[in-house]
Amino acid sequence: MMPSTPKDIALLVFGTLFCLAAIPMDNSKGQQIRPPNYDESVVPKFELPSVLQSPIPLDIPSIGNDRPRIKTSAQWPAHRQALVAMLAEQEYGFLPTETVKVTSECFDDADAVLSGKTHSNIRRRQLAITLERNGKSLRIDMIVWSPRNRPNAPCFVGLNFRGNQSTCDDPSVRLTTSWCDQRHPGVENNRATEQSRANQSERWPIAEIVDQGFAVATAHYCDIDPDFDDGFENGIHGLYPDFRCDEQHPNRWGSIAAWAWGLSRMADVLVQLDGVKADALLVVGHSRLGKTALWAGATDERFRIVISNNSGCGGAALSKRAYGESVARINTSFPHWFNRNFRKYNDREEAMPFDQHQLIATIAPRPVYISSASNDRWADPLGEMLSGKEASAAYELLGKEGFAATELPAFNTPIGSTSIGYHLREGNHDMLLYDWQQFVAFAKRNGL
Ligand code: GTR
């Protein structure tokens, strides 16, 4: 069947790009990268450091596995900080400690219009958040939908891929003026056009979420840092020319860390916003933005619940399983996502003295939810789930229930505890109503 609608054509183009990711490729040095493995029987044997074991010291990367374990919950806060610092050093990059001035202005406050219908029970606000440092500034457009009948609503906070206008058909939503990926429908000369409205609305079932008593806040991730490799000149990195990740500073922030930091700036505004319950922010994200949600949860404890959807390599998936996307592939396709130190592990996952279960553990004792999709082998659903299981020891030390499963559950059957939840949705790499329904249910089980 020939693709006929713009959506079919877009699916075909992305499907092709996705398949291309599976053929052998070279890294920047012309060395061939290992082809992706999809055979469970050749997943190498690997050992993971316990999440209670003190992480590799930052300055002695060659140290072995013989590191002391913490034994009491009183030791957890310092241990957690050490895990975050280790992951910053090895993978995501440190955030600048010098802050920016954050101001916001609400330029729109009205009833939401969704699927062509005005919802008098849903309040829509659009805020321009301005970040300023040393005479330079950056604008993030945040849109917030909140239930009028719940004045103090818990709030999902997540970034979107294509601009706020892509999340719904509401003509009042400001078109993003930030860089957009040319391959997406409704983009001309890297700018969004009117045709881009609602083209990812299936990822943002706003009315259904708000009907359950939750607010939703989102912003375009490219407002924070355009998603291409420009040597960290643009976006928020442009406000910190003195804190750039480069050859001399291989442990500074890459783009995932920048996006996560941007979520924290959104939180700065949300904790002050009427209608939003300041201590009930749930950070959520899909794919690269699921990796981002996890790092935001690790670096900012104001996020009370952390949700990663189909986050894969560099997100929830264990790298050492060597299944689906590998460290070498992600670092080659997206050299700006992580810091430079992470490249040391290109096709050397067995040499990694850490893994993604330690990232999940940094969220403890706060609840974490991991979701996968059955056709999303690139993201390694089992590896995503197992890092939740491996993080359990931290939750148990803190008196919370962990996660026991070692095999994937049946499709569309959420499992786990109120602390660590998981589901495997039947279908493709995406974040859909079914996923959101499970996030809401998990939040409610946690009293929100
Ligand atoms: C893919 C990448 C994945 C995932 C995905 C996305 O190309 O390999 O790690 O992040 O992009 O964000 O859509």
Image (spheres, helix red, strand yellow):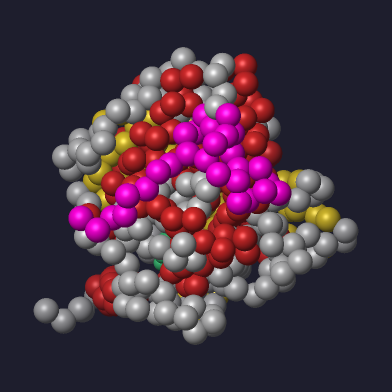
Instruction: Indicate the position of residue 6 as horizontal and vertical percent values.
Output: 29, 75
Residue under the point 47% across and 72% down: 333
Residue 200 appears left or right of 239: left
Find residue 170 and report its horizontal and vertical position in percent. 44, 55
Q: Position of residue 286 (x, y in %)?
A: 42, 52
Estimate the x, y position of residue 403 in percent, counting from the top left: 34, 28
Residue 32 visible in the shown view: yes
Ligand 1: give its quadrant.
bottom left
> How many numbered tags mark residues here?
0
Query: What secondary structure predominates along the stretch shown in magenta?
Result: loop
Judged from this view, the residue extending furthest toward the right is: 134
On the image, which quarter does residue 91 sit in?
A: bottom right
User: In which quadrant is the C terminus drawn?
Assistant: top left
Magenta-tinted stretch: 41-68
Image quadrant in which the N terminus is located: bottom left
* Residue toward you, 80 or 439: 80
Rendered position, 268 above or below 349: above
For image coordinates 44% across by 20% down, the residue present is: 396
